Image (cartoon, rainbow, N blue to C red):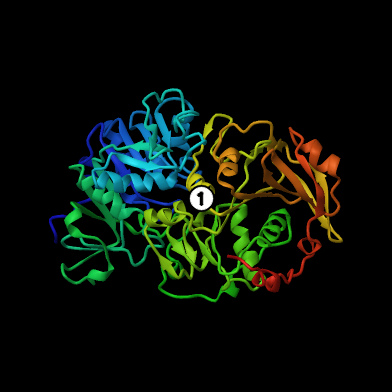
Amino acid sequence: MSNKVISSQQAAELIKDEDTLGVNGFVGFGHPEELSVAIEERFLATGHPANLTLVYGAGQGDGKSPFGLNHFGHEGLTKKVICGHVGLAPKLAALISNNIIEGYNFPQGVVTHLFRAIAGNKVGVITHVGLKTFADPRIEGAKMNSKTKEDAVELINVAGKELLLYKHLPINVALIRGTTADEFGNITMEEEAVFLETLSIAQAAKNSGGIVIAQVKRLAKRGSLNPQHVKIPGIMVDHIVIAKPENHMMSFTVDYNPAYSGQIKVPLDSLSMLELNERKIIARRSAFELIPGGVINLGIGVPDGVATVALEEGLGESISLSIESGAIGGVPGPGLNIGASTNPDALIDHPYQFDYYDGGGLDVTFLGLAEADQYGNINVSKFNNRAVGCGGFINISQNSKKVIFCGTFTAGSSNIEIHDGKLQINKEGKHKKFVQAVEQITFSGDYANDIGQDVLYITERAVFKLSKDGLMLVEIAPGIDLQRDILEQMEFTPTISPDLKLMDHRIFVDVPMGIRGEILSKDYK
């Protein structure tokens, strides 16, 4: 057996106090669970390693169970987090929210690019991404709490343009995973749903003088792997850990789905359709914004229903859906399986997907609407001082040609029914989502107006458009009273379009809308 193969306990012992760890994963996909378990167990038994810094892009966990980065949610084990999202690891998030550890929330794409910058020994990531959001040092500087003092983001001027510099830091240990490793450490990823920033994290650690520990499913003889399938070269891998099956599921909810990894294609008519409720109403209205031949991004939650509606309307092959994780084509997975795609056309690395997004490659994006204000700002990253994180929201929303925010009008235990093609509000949600000022600016309406973005805010009962004066109400649902059901449920009064319209009646009838011809006839350039 290769001398690179060690146990997970031996791997945990290699991590020193004060080390900075680069950790790979996306929700439940690609996280090296075996290694995380071993590190937690060693800490609980010995108090070491202590005072770790975690650097990672996407959130890793299911929001409740002791999976993923929740293993690092112990006072004394972790001292600092630099991440794209933390809400899926509530124990870790609580340490930040309670001001026990330091926390920085960088846009997810910036973190993936930061690993590449570290690998290339660059000063950091210089980008427009994050301007006029909480990541901008003129606002919060990406700091997640008052304990976090050091400036990690700097406003600079290059060739007359304002840009942000997210600063370089060394990576001491890379924690990554793949499917098969040969005896030298060459790694393939044939049973992974996404490739993520696995290579970039490994390169960052090696060029920082650190070590790379790779969790895999199985070991192969050196020289037996197809070099075209090797994603991580053995020269970049120091140690291999062969995981227990229960710690190497495809995700935290899926043992293995070959339609996610491209091993097989499944009939898409086997996917379940949505029942007609407020979520489907929002997805249906959003589907009117689809573009034939367009490159589309879908966020998590309500927006992922747009994919299901597109299939129902016969538009599956007429649009290209993509996910920030690197999946292109197919149908994005729902809920905690976001990050994977059923029947993908292609899988590319996470940082390359963000290169394409940041450069304006997206035609339309559909993202969540957690909290909006009169200026068109959106907050999805912080609520009641509780750390959540922005994920890829800032990269995507700042750079897509058209942005559609999708969400219910109020939040918390509402009761809404549909009768005879009309919407009926029986009980309002407990919380208003359209507020005077958002708690944190994850999307800047001011920045969007500066660059001339087309922005819509779609709910089950109303549609708003971003104007120079902030939110403008442009559509209401049939059956809805403007004063009672909309204006009285907002903390501000929006501009009301002089051409206020009813939302299309087909949205509220429980049969396919028949919009395929309308979408395909659009003249989009």
Q: Which residue corresponds to the image point at 33% horizontal and 32% vertical from the top-left? A: 77
Q: Is residue 110 visible?
A: yes
Which structural element holds mark 1?
A: helix
Q: In the rendered image, which quarter contains the C terminus?
A: bottom right
Closer to the camera in the image, 522 or 224: 522
Locate residue 326: give its quadrant: bottom left
The amino acid beneath tag 1 is Asn
Q: Is residue 136 above or below residue 26?
A: above
Q: Is residue 210 above or below residue 48?
A: below
Q: Which residue corresponds to the image point at 84% horizontal and 44% vertical from the top-left? A: 482
Q: Is residue 65 above or below residue 237?
A: above
Q: Is residue 5 visible?
A: no
Instruction: Name the spot of residue 98 as percent of width and height, x first.
Output: 48, 26
Q: Which residue corresponds to the image point at 55% horizontal and 52% vertical from the top-left? A: 300
Instruction: Name the spot of residue 446 as percent of width and height, x first.
Output: 59, 38
Dot 1 crowding, Cα within 10 Å, few <14, some 14–19, many 20+: many
Locate residue 311: give its quadrant: bottom right
Residue hosting label 1:
399
Closer to the camera in the image, 186 or 506: 506
Q: Is residue 157 above or below residue 284?
A: above
Locate residue 181: give its quadrant: bottom left
Instruction: Name the spot of residue 473 as percent of width and height, x first.
Output: 76, 45
